Structures are given as C-alpha cells and as structure tokens.
Image: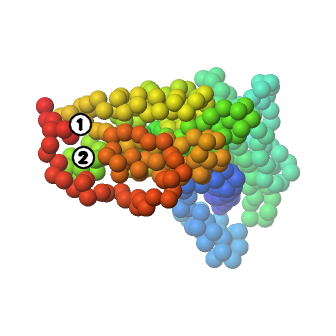
Amino acid sequence: MDYAAVVQHWGLRAMENVRSRAKSMRDNPLLQQRSSATLHTLYPLRSAEPVLQDRAQTTASKQDVAAGLNAEEPWVRVALNAVGDAVMTIDHQSTITYMNRRAETLTGWSELESIGKPLSRVLHLVDGKTHHRIVTPAHRAIEENRVQDLSLDCALVRQDGSKLEIEDSAAPIHDRHGRVTGAVIVFRDASMSKVMLERMAYLAQHDALTGLANRALMTERLSQAIGLARRHQHLVALLYLDLDDFKPINDSLGHAVGDSLLQAVASRLRDCMRDIDTVCRQGGDEFAILLAEIRKPEDATKVAEKLLAVLSRPYRIEGHELLITLSIGISLYPDDADDADALMHNADMAMYHTKRNGRNGHQCFTAEMNTLPIRRRRTEPSEHRTFHSPQFFFDF
C-alpha cells in the first residue's frame, strides 16, 4: 500500500473540511465564538496537518516521501487508526487492501474479514432519498485519475443492514512511475457533523450555565418583536432584573452555591413566562425578559410583581436556605423607545433607579431618568455588610 498517498489524501481532506466548516462559521457570526473548540473535537489529530505540510515542503520528490513513510509504516498505521475519519484503500480491481479502525466501526466490517473483498460489498452506498445503489467515488477516482467527492444525501448500508448518512471522498493511488494502482477512500458520519454544528449554534445563542437565551439571541428576538409590534400596533415590554445582594452569597458560600442559585432563579423565571416570551441571562446576576406582545403597560407591571413574589420564596441549596430579592426596570415600545438598543438602555436605567431607591421593587422608565445623575456600579457600599443576617440564609 502507498502510505504516502493515503496520508496525503487524508491530510488534505481533513484540512479541506476544516476550511469548509470555518467558512460556514464565518457566514454565521453566531458560530464564530465556538468554532475553535468544536473543530478540535471534530478533528482530534488536526496537529498532523503541519507535519504533512512540512514533509511535502522538505522532500525532493513524491518517491522520497513514499520511501520515508514506508520506513515508518508502523507509525503511519497507528496514526491512521487514531484519526476521526474512516480510511480505506483498494487496488486497481477495487479489492480492499486496508481499512482503519474508524472504517471498521462505521461499516460494521472488521479489517480482517474485509481484506480481499470487493469494495462494493463492504462499502455499500445508496441514495439517501431513493435508496438506489450508487457507485462509490473510488471507482471514478481510478478511472478519471483525480480526486472525487461523494454526492450529497448518500447513505452507507452497514453490515447489519442499518443505514448511516456519510460524507465521502476518494483519490487515486500511484506507484513510483505515476501509474494508478488503486484508490484511498476517506469518509465520516455526516450526522455527527450536523449534530456538532447544531450544538455549536445552540451554544452561540444560549447561556452555558442556565440554558437561557444570551445577549445575542435576546437582541435578535427583541428586534423581531419590535418589527411585529410596529406592523400590528401592539406593545412590547422589556424587563431588566438584577438579584439584590447576590455578591455576598457568592463570596460567602462559594461559586458552586452561587451557580446553583442562578440556575434555580432561571428555572423559576422560565416557569413564569409564556411560550412567546424570552428569558435571557445578560451576564453575572442580571437577567432580561422580553414580553413580545402585551395590550397595555399595566401588563408589564403585573409580570414584574409576579416575579418579585415568586423569586422571593426561599431557595434550598446545598444545606442552605437562601432568600433573595429583585430590582426590576421596565421599558416599553413604542412609549419609551422605538428600537432595540434604546429599549435595552432604558430598561437598564430604570432597573438601576430601582436599586438606588431601595431595591426589592420595580420601576418603569421615564424620560427624567436620563437627566438624573446615576453611576452604574456592580458593587454598592451597602453590599459589603457582614453576611450573617438570617434574612439572607439559614443552615438546616
């Protein structure tokens, strides 16, 4: 087997897939912040790419590369068995000459029972929609002496009869004289790629700790809600919530308790809202709620009063009974602002006026708030008081 061709094609194919997914992520800004870690998961041996490039740049000819790789054949076999892609090779008669462990897993065939068998028997490919048998790209790679990609919606019929959607490509293998002697096939479970990309999209739009919408998703939905409200002449409300005295709880009882408290708060917030509303964690101990459609301003204040009552009930977390209160600010479209940024700014301003005026309450935005001097501060002097009062937590 020409290991040079096998490793070269796998390396180029891996880099091509990295570039392809990177392009998809560039086209979708919400995926960019998660791309690096996930691509590392999809291609665990991506570090092999520089090795392949260095080999190609420092050897005088393909024959020299082949000779070097043949000398390291045990290493190459170990590397191919460790990669995340399935790799198979065939000779000029389409007889299987090699398959790595990933290929064994995906096809259901072992290498021992596959060697010497026709490729069509082990790599049984069908159209995902019509279920008609299709020719593998390896045959075209040999006949046309060039790299071939598998068409979309292709499924692999495994040895047990189950079907698996795959992505596939093939390249011809040449001998030292340039003659085609076979082909190398590289394929992967396409459903896993979709799952990973869907997971990346979810993480790009949701808070990792609470599972709530994050700022990006909230901004998107708020803009959509304003557009619908403008068209159908109804109101939109935005509520900004800040947990009073969360920092002393976090500092005194530890971040694990603080995180559990934030998750419990998020759960109660979700339970209070309608399906059409959006609950967002803005960051730290701040949350936002989008009431996508209300009839009158009083509807928003009623929701705020409900939240104050529900979230003030005790939380039992890791041997502690915790009590918290909320400061809530409310802004309305179109009464207070006519775009998403202004609406968020005004709700934020109203929330900090609530905190300054005693906390544990709610205020609606007024134009006068923009003229009053107020400096937003994460920690206020009163938050430094000793955290032993029973109004905050009880051990049990």
- In-image side of 132 versus 388 (left or right): right
- In-image side of 172 versus 335 (left or right): right
Label 1 secondary element? strand
Number of marks in the rendered image: 2
Indicate the amino acid at tag 2: Ile
Q: How is the image coloured?
A: rainbow
Report whether residue 388 is seen. Answer: yes
Q: Are marks 1 and 2 in contact (CB under 8 Å)?
A: yes
The N terminus - image quarter: bottom right
Q: Which mark is residue 322?
A: 1
Q: Which residue is mark 2?
A: 249
Compute the Cα span from label 1 to label 2.
8 Å
Residue depicted at 30% across the width and 57% down the height = 380
The residue nearer to you, when weighing 70 against 152, is: 152
Looking at marks 1 and 2 on the same chain, the residue that comes earlier in the sequence is marked by: 2
The C terminus - image quarter: top left
